[in-house]
Image: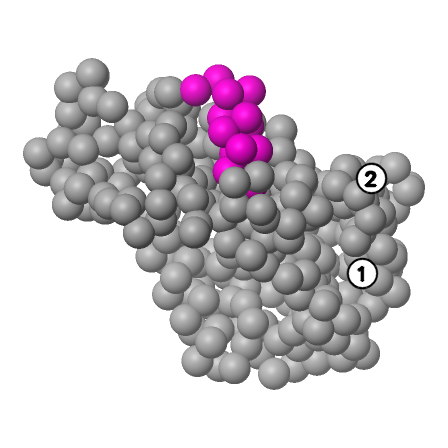
Amino acid sequence: MAWVIVNGKFINRTEAKVDIEDRGYQFGDGVYEVIRVYNGVMFTAKEHMDRFSRSADNIGIKLPYTQEQLRNLLDQLIDKNNLRLGIIYLQITRGTAPRNHAFPAANIIPNLVAYTKELEIPTATLHSGVKAVLTEDIRWLRCDIKSLNLLGNSLAKQKAVEHGCYEAIQHRGEVITEGSSSNILLVKDGVVITHPSNQLILKGITKDVILELCAEHRIPVEERSFTIRELEQADELFLTSTTSEVTPIVAVNARQVGRGVPGPLTRRLQSLFKQRIEAQCGSL
Ligand SMILES: Cc1ncc(COP(=O)(O)O)c(C=O)c1O
């Protein structure tokens, strides 16, 4: 039996229900997190709790738990579901209220749910790399909030699928922002370049771990906007996300990146990233 959390209670997955006037369901009025679990241990749990709090705070949802209480609940969920390798999906919405665009009265009770899913490490794509397609970034201007409104991201990912690609790389005009569900980093002349974490992209936790590792190992980094042209001339390109980890991108719009195979710096960062996981969660 799969256990899920609904508003602090552990219940059977099949008994979990959402009211048709939940504001997440009607307005996408809520925020979420996806947290990786290796060996039954949450990776970068604190960073995910911090971002969850920040996202909720940004849209005026008050979390009903402290970070410690929430972490404790999620640890119990991992244990109850005997999850070794997978993810936790965690979401909170503003709550249930008669449909009205404006926020309901202040005493509305948010709806918090969490569930787990088993998920393997994507060894094949980590090894061989993936293809990507470019697409205009049509999303709103607060992409730093990990909001439930994912229609722009979803349309982008669908375009990738229709082009036989793994990811869609979004751009606002000439400037590359991020993937539909990942951050994008390029390597040029030994320097890692990635869009700054401002309101146009999600401050990816995997990307931040990579930037930390670069600092520790004296790999030069530039957090600045870069253009489609720079992307086309990159030596290496990779994407980062909780589920895709550090995935090499070997072609964009059917044109090969660098030599068309995962590059040496990408490989090095993959190996440093794996060491970081093992330091927190035990050997893989
Ligand atoms: C739009 C977007 N950007 C970036 C990321 C990567 O973030 P993280 O590394 O925290 O998973 C995600 C993850 O799902 C995402 O949806």
Q: Identify the image quadrant of residue 64.
A: top left
Q: Answer whether residue 141 is visible to the viewer in this image.
A: no
Q: Assign a secondary structure to mark 1.
A: helix
Residue farthest along the front direction in this orientation: 1
Q: How is the image coloured?
A: one colour
Q: Position of residue 202 (x, y in %)?
A: 52, 43
Tell me: is circle 2 under 8 Å from ligand 1.
Answer: no
Q: Which residue is mark 1?
A: 266
The kind of secondary structure element at disc 2 is helix
Q: Nearer the viewer, mark 1 or mark 2?
A: 2
Determine the residue positioned at 75% across, 41% down: 281
Within 10 Å of the Cα at label 2, are there few (<14), some (14-19), or many (20+) other Cα atoms? few
Pinpoint residue 3: horizontal percent, then vertical percent.
Answer: 43, 44
Say which label, 1 or 2, has the lower sequence index. Answer: 1
Question: What kind of residue is marked 1?
Answer: Thr
Overall secondary structure of the magenta section: helix
- Image coordinates for residue 113, horizontal then vertical, percent: 37, 38
Q: Quadrant of residue 232?
A: bottom right
Q: Which residues are magenta?
A: 65-78
Q: Is 190 placed left or right of 193 in the picture?
A: right
- Residue nearer the viewer, 194 or 23: 23
Residue type at numbered disc 2 = Ala
Distance from disc 1 to disc 2, alpha carbons, whole Å, reads: 20 Å
Depth order, front residue of 139/54: 54
Residue assigned mark 2 = 279
Kindly identify the residue that appears in the image at 15 percent across and 19 percent down: 105
From the viewer's perspective, tell me whether residue 199 is left or right of residue 224. left
Mark 1 crowdedness (10 Å alpha carbons): few <14, some 14-19, many ≥20: many
On whether residue 208 falls in the magenta region, the answer is: no
Q: Is residue 164 above or below residue 155?
A: below
Tell me if 5 is positioned left or right of 25 in this view. Answer: right
